[in-house]
Amino acid sequence: MGDFLEIAGKKINNRLFIGTGKFSSYPIMKVALEESGVDITTVALRRVNTGSKTENILDYIPSACKIMINTSGARDAEEAVRIARLAKAAQSGNWIKIEVIRDNKYLLPDNLETLKAVELLVKEGFVVFPYMSPDLSMARRMVEAGAAAIMPLGSPIGSNRGVKTRELIEILVNEIKLPVIVDAGLGKPSEACECMELGCAAVLVNTAIAISENPIKMAKAFAQAVYAGRVAYLSGIPATSKIANASSPLTGFLREDKT
Amino acid sequence: MLIKINGKAEEIKTGLSLVGLISFKGLCAEKLVIEHNLRIIPKEEWQGVVLQENDSVEILSFVGGG
C-alpha cells in the first residue's frame, strides 16, 4: 500500500523489528526472521569464548535484514561509545541502538548517559537509536542531538507486560517528529498492535517471540498484528463515547410508537 | 610471556602477532573485532601487531541480543 518507514535512506516495509537474543537455536531464529519478513534485527557484541568454538550468529541473519547493534552491557556513555566503535570496526554497519543501563533489577535505561552517547556518536556519523524511558523533555533533547528515531520502553525488558507506559508513549507520538519505536516489554501480538494503533512507527520485539513455544509462528503473528495496527492507524480510528450510538437505524421499527 | 586476553591473564609464546593469536586460539577471524591496549585494530593491521608482555587484548564477536 506504499506505506513504508524511511530511516537514514533505508526503506523499511516491515514495522516489526525482531531482536535475536534467547532463541533456542540459530536455525530457528533464522526461519523466524525469514518467515516474518523483518527488515531490521538487533545483535549484541560480547567477548568471545576463547575456550570453545561457537557459531557466528551473522551467518543466520537473512541477507535482506539490516543489522542494528545494541550497546547492551554499557553502564555509561563512554562504554556505549566504545561498543559502537568496536561494532563499526567489525564491519557491521553504523546503525546503533544505544542501551545504557545501570539498574540490574528493572533494566531501566539511564536517559542522561544515553543522551551523552547519542551526542557523541551522531558526530561520528552513526545512525543512532536511543533506548529510553518515555520522557518528553529527554526525547526532545534526543531529537536535538540528532537521533534517527527514539525507542521508548513499553515495560521492563523481557517482562512481557505490555505497554504500561501507554500515556507517555502517546505524548511522544504526538509531540516528537522522529519515528517512535516501542522497544521492550511487549508480550503479545495484541500489545504490538496497540502500539501501532497509537501511531508508533514500529516496534521491537525479542523475548516474547524467542521464548514462545513456537517462535516461528509467533514471529509471524507479531508481524500480522503490527501490520493490522498500522493499517488501523492510517484508516483513522474513530473517537470513543461513554454512551451507545446505534449502528442500526432508529426508525422503521415493527411497533406502534408511544407518544 | 604473560598477556591479558578478555580480562584473563594467559601465557603465550613471544613474537606472536594478532593473526597468530587468533589462529593459536582456534578462532575464525571473520567478523571478529580486536582491541589491543584499548585501541581498535583494523583487520588489515593484525599481522603487523606483535604482542608484548603485559599487553591487553579484547577479542569480541556478535551474539544474540534485543
Image (spheres, grey):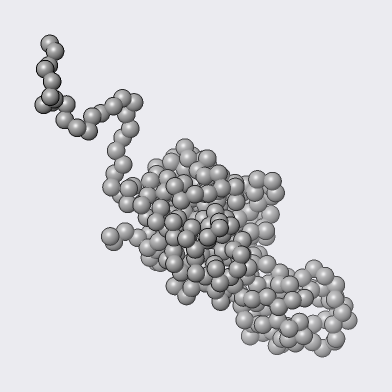
Q: Nearer the viewer, residue A233 or A90?
A: A233
Quadrant of the rendered structure where residue A84 is? bottom right
Quadrant of the snapshot with the N terminus of chain A: bottom left
Task: Give the image location of residue A129, x and y in percent.
Answer: 52, 57
Quadrant of the snapshot with the C terminus of chain A: top left
* Residue at left offset 31%, top offset 35%: A239
Task: Give the image location of residue A166, x and y in percent.
Answer: 48, 40
Whether A27 is drawn above or below B46: the answer is: above
Q: Nearer the viewer, residue B65 or A145?
A: B65
Whether B29 is drawn above or below A156: the answer is: below
Is residue A123 rendered to the left or right of residue A178?
right
Number of marks in picture:
0
Residue lying furthest top in this view?
A: A259
Is residue A3 rendered to the left or right of residue A154?
left
Is residue A140 rendered to the left or right of residue B48?
left
* Residue at left offset 36%, top offset 52%: A228
* Residue at left offset 85%, top offset 86%: B13
Task: Give the image location of residue A156, x and y in percent.
Answer: 59, 46
Whether A15 is drawn above or below B41: the answer is: above
Task: Give the image location of residue B32, x and y in percent.
Answer: 65, 77
Confirm whether residue A121 shows in the render. no
* Residue at left offset 16%, top offset 26%: A250
Whether A189 is drawn above or below A37: the answer is: above
Quadrant of the rendered structure where residue A9 is? bottom left
Confirm whether residue A184 shows in the render. yes
Quadrant of the rendered structure where residue B21 is? bottom right
